[in-house]
Each structure stands twice: as C-alpha cells, then as structure tokens.
Image (cartoon, rainbow, N blue to C red):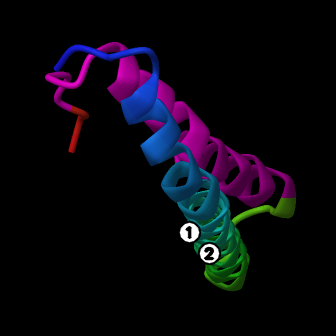
Amino acid sequence: MAVKNGEEFIKMAPVIMITAPKLLLRLLATYLRFRGRVDRASREFKTSLIKEGMPGDLAEALAKQYSDENRFTDFAMNFARNPAYQYPK
C-alpha cells in the first residue's frame, strides 16, 4: 500500500492515538500481574522449603534464583531475539 502524501497516516493517526495508551496500560497490567504471581510463588516456595527443614539462607538463594529465572522481561527479550527458541522444561 503506497502512501499518498501521508493521507493514510493522517486517517490512521487518531486511531493510533486512542489505541496506543490502552495497549500500554494493558501491557503494564499484565506485566504487574505476572510479576506479582512470580513473587508470590517465590515466597511460598521459600516458606515451604524452610518449613521442611532447609536452612534459611539456602532457601532464600533458591527462591531468588526461581524469581530471577521467571522474569517476564528476560523471557520477552529472548523471545524477541529468537522466537523459535525452545525453553527448557
């Protein structure tokens, strides 16, 4: 589709201006929800490890590693670089 003196862009500009903030808010909400779930799972993982008798410092290190490996930003950047990459199960 060829742009004729920017006419198509001028027609699309209001739609983009209305839709972009909504999209950004949805992405932010999704990110915060995902991050909250990871943080909660990490805390529960840590408390269950301590409850089962693991030393607190080791449980803290494992919970931090779990939290760090489940960062959405890292996942998104890796996916953007190579969408065909198969993450380990």
The reply to whether dot 2 and dot 1 touch (C-beta < 8 Å) is: yes
Q: Locate residue 73, reporting x and y percent.
A: 59, 39
Residue at image point 60% right, 63% down: 18
**Residue density around tag 2, few if under 14, some if 14–19, many if 20 or more, within 10 Å:** few
Residue at image point 70% right, 69% down: 39
Q: CA distance from mark 2 to mark 1?
A: 5 Å
- In-image side of 23 versus 67 (left or right): left
Q: Quadrant of residue 37?
A: bottom right
Q: Which mark is residue 70?
A: none
The local secondary structure at tag 2 comes to: helix
Q: Quadrant of residue 5?
A: top left
Q: Locate residue 29, reporting x and y percent.
A: 65, 72
- In-image side of 2 versus 51 (left or right): left
Q: Quadrant of the C terminus?
A: top left
Q: Quadrant of the N terminus?
A: top left
Position of 85 relative to 24 (above/below): above
Residue at image point 72% right, 59% down: 59
Mark 2: amino acid: Arg
Residue range (magenta): 57-86
Q: Locate residue 68, reporting x and y percent.
A: 65, 42
Q: Is residue 30 magenta?
A: no
Mark 1: amino acid: Thr
- Magenta-colored segment: predominant secondary structure: helix
Residue positioned most to the right: 57
Residue at image point 57% right, 54% down: 14
What residue is shown with label 1?
Answer: 30
Q: Nearer the viewer, residue 57 or 29?
A: 29
Q: Is residue 65 magenta?
A: yes
Q: Nearer the viewer, residue 49 or 42?
A: 42
Q: Locate residue 4, reporting x and y percent.
A: 33, 16
What residue is shown with label 2?
Answer: 33
- In-image side of 60 versus 22 (left or right): right
